[in-house]
Amino acid sequence: MPEIIEIEIYRRWGEAMVGRRIETVVADDDWFLKDGATAEAVAAVAEGSTVDAVRRRGKLMLVDLSSGSTLGWRFGMTGRLIVDGDAAIDQLEYSSMRDDPAWDRFALGFTDGGSARIRDPRRLGGVSIDPDEDALGVDAFALTAGELRDRVAIGSVAIKARLLDQKRVAGIGNLIADETLWRAGLDPARPAGALSEPERRRLLRHLRSVLTDFDRDGGSHTGRLHESRVRGGLCPMDGAPLDRRTIGGRTTFSCPHHQG
């Protein structure tokens, strides 16, 4: 479930890695290494290096090394970041309530005895070397009105599918998209290019408020719509039964009364 908010929390937590020298790499799960990376290749660029910076673009966390390489860390739906034994987030929505070290898929061991680990029950995340950051769209926190108009609000594809397209806007996930469209009063199935200028302004305003609220409140699961995103759920705004559809390949909840 990690969306841009959770990865931003991870990035802040990961700043504890900055300035520390890597002694060992634990990358025993070949499945978790992506884009041609191998355990030997990761060790070659990481072991002996210092962590220079921890950055983020959308849902991708980036660990810059003094060797000149960057490790790209993805957390999938159930991945958590654990630094020196403490987790950035104790529990994720839609993930197991158990906390099993057997789910550690990748780890860096530091010369001071500490570590940084990705614990991912479903193995949907991954680690790569020098990921193509430009393959991602503009970070959702930085999206401007012009970029929304030119990159998102175009064509006949449903507006929700456009928001979820990481090549257009990086970081928006299912919960953020549903909450934003619900607050903005926009049907998720509306063709993206059919939005008027006032509707685009409203969409961007509510996206910014959702990101701000979720960041303040501690996660993408903290929205006003979230508890009603169940079969038979009622709109928290007007009490209408929510529609449940699949849009952009994701389960979508919306209000047929006020989302037009």
Image (cartoon, helix red, strand yellow):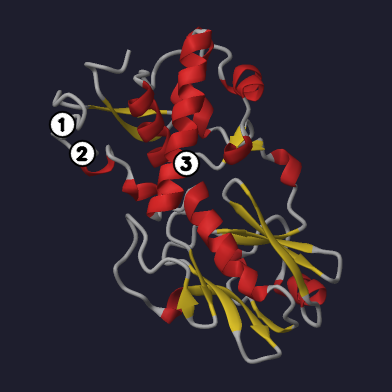
**Which secondary structure lies at badge 3?**
helix
Residue 118, disc: none
Q: For the residues labelled 2 and 1, say whether their Cβ atoms are less than 8 Å apart.
A: yes
Q: Of the numbered discs in the image, which one, if any, rests on residue 211?
A: 3
Instruction: Find the distance from the CA under tag 3 to the CA under tag 1.
Output: 23 Å
Query: What type is the residue that disc 3 sits on?
Result: Leu
Which numbered disc covers residue 234?
Answer: 1
Category of crowding for the residue at label 1, using alpha-carbon neighbours closer than 10 angstroms: few (below 14), some (14–19), many (at least 20): some
Specify whether residue 158 is in view: no
Q: Residue at x 60, y 68 (%)?
A: 14
- Residue 199 coordinates in the image, percent (x, y): 46, 14
User: If the image is split into quadrants, where does the C terminus sit?
Assistant: top left
Mark 3 vs mark 2: give the one in front.
3
Question: Which residue in the protein does label 2 denote?
Answer: 228
Of callouts 3 and 1, the N-terminal one: 3
Q: Is residue 217 above or below residue 31?
A: above
Q: Are marks 3 and 1 in contact (CB under 8 Å)?
A: no
